[in-house]
Amino acid sequence: MLLILTTFISNRLRYIADLVLKQILGIDFRFTISVDEFTGYEGPKIIYARQPLTDELFIESCELLFETSLILREVQSTIANGLPVLFESGHPLSALPFDPLAAAFYLVSRYEEYYPHKKDSVGRYPAEESIAWRGKFLDIPIVHFWAEAIGTMLHEHFPGLKFRPPAYRFIPTIDVDHAWCYLERPFLRTLGGFGRSFAHGHFQEIAERIKVLSGTMPDPYDNYQYINSIHGKYGNFPLFFILFADYGRNDNNVTVTSKNFHLLIRELDRQGNVGIHPSLSSNKHLLKLGEEYRGLSKVLDRNVTASRQHFLKLAMPETYRNLIQLGITDDYSMGYASHTGFRAGIAIPFQFYDLLKDEVAQLTIHPVSVMDVTLRDYLRLSRVEALEKIKDMIRVFKAVNGEYVSLWHNESLGDTGRWNGWRSVYEEMVKLAST
């Protein structure tokens, strides 16, 4: 048991110490504010404070974890011992050249996303606004490296201290924005589809639509048997996030009243587990979000507990508060659509910390680091380049005992059109991530 002497045991300090020390490093610990108790303790112990209160091992703290409100501050990343760091220490007796707990809290709580910032065309917080992107460490789960710095320091001073890190996990997830490309759409939308194809000269698309609707060709997005076979080969149970929303400009799945759509949803829930993919328009409308949630829950005959935001659109803290209010317990939206990497600097699930309430919330956030659309459309990588990027990511997750959450779409696994050949990328990814 590691004993930590500090001057004030705040909610923030408890939260981030549990995440870094217990969940990442696997160390049992407790806090004390009593110098007498600390002095008399004969086991491993450190001081986390502004000043060394005794002559024991000491890490200089900054004020961030002892505050209870959101304070706009200029935070810069620097390099210390070859590692990107935040909140660099200037105390000559500090065992580490920065405050690793405050740095981890700043990233994991998404403190910077509460600041006024520019939004992208979809209204999202852009990667380019983040300190990780500016400091060139977005592709690194930097919180784990900071935790490793703590672990190395503790091991050197207390070689008998026990470490029990978590095990690596792989969770494949599939977003179902369009359950089918042509099927189960109202007559007017089908007619409009023909009109758009004709207007743009996409005559092959017209022929394909006719074949699918006449039953002479399978729908190109109907890849569910293939998805099930790939995951079944390695014993994986995927998460399917279903867009279950009324038709809108950016929300255009099949009609939610379709009986075949309902049958598909229940079948996917048997193959793995179904969560909700809240529509883009519901991000600002709690009533609409509630309607989508209740509709999907009714189809499944159970309460939905997992979610991923459409377009990965998050607004802090409103999006997460709305999900909690509905009963969502796990969210898989913490990533950037435009970039691969670690938006919160971490590769394992963590509890949402509501900075405005200054408390831990009952919602587990599962970071997403790489998405099919990111690789092909945003980064414009070839299949070979995309697979190399994925391999690099998987190696990182395995090295830090993380939870690798892959994000693909049923349409990108159709092996047709702009996604021709991408099945091979997915198959190799599942193989590497599963072994």
Image (tube, grey):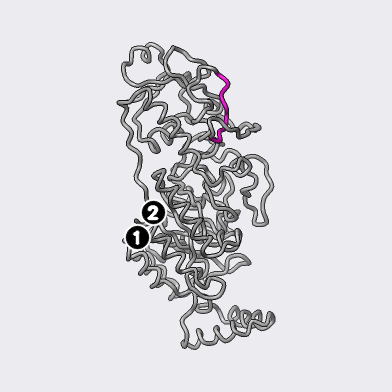
Image location of residue 105, percent across then percent down:
51, 35
Kind of element beneath mark 1: loop
Specify the amino acid type for callout 1.
Answer: Asn
Quarter of the view holding residue 338: bottom right
In screen coordinates, is 73 left or right of 255? Answer: right
Please report the bounds of the magenta region as a residue range: 83-91
User: Magenta stretch containing residue 84, yes or no?
Assistant: yes
In the rendered picture of this protein, how many numbered marks are placed on residues? 2
Q: Nearer the viewer, residue 149 or 119?
A: 149
User: Magenta stretch containing residue 168, yes or no?
Assistant: no
Quarter of the view holding residue 26: top left
Residue receiving disc 2: 170
Image location of residue 347, percent across then percent down:
45, 45
Where residue 236 is drawn, which disc sits there? 1
In screen coordinates, is 357 left or right of 267? Answer: right
Contact check, label 2 and label 1, Cβ < 8 Å: yes
Image location of residue 83, percent across then percent down:
53, 35
| Magenta stretch secondary structure, dominant | loop
As displayed, is residue 379 above or below residue 159? below
Residue that appears at 48% across and 56% down = 390
Q: How crowded is mark 1: few (under 14 residues within 10 Å), some or many (20 or more)?
A: some
Kind of element beneath mark 2: strand
Q: Which of 176 and 257 is in front in this view?
A: 176
Where residue 256 is drawn, which disc sits there? none
Specify the amino acid type for callout 2.
Answer: Phe
As displayed, is residue 275 above or below residue 139? below
Residue that appears at 48% across and 26% down = 10
Residue that appears at 42% across and 15% down = 56
Image location of residue 178, percent across then percent down:
52, 70
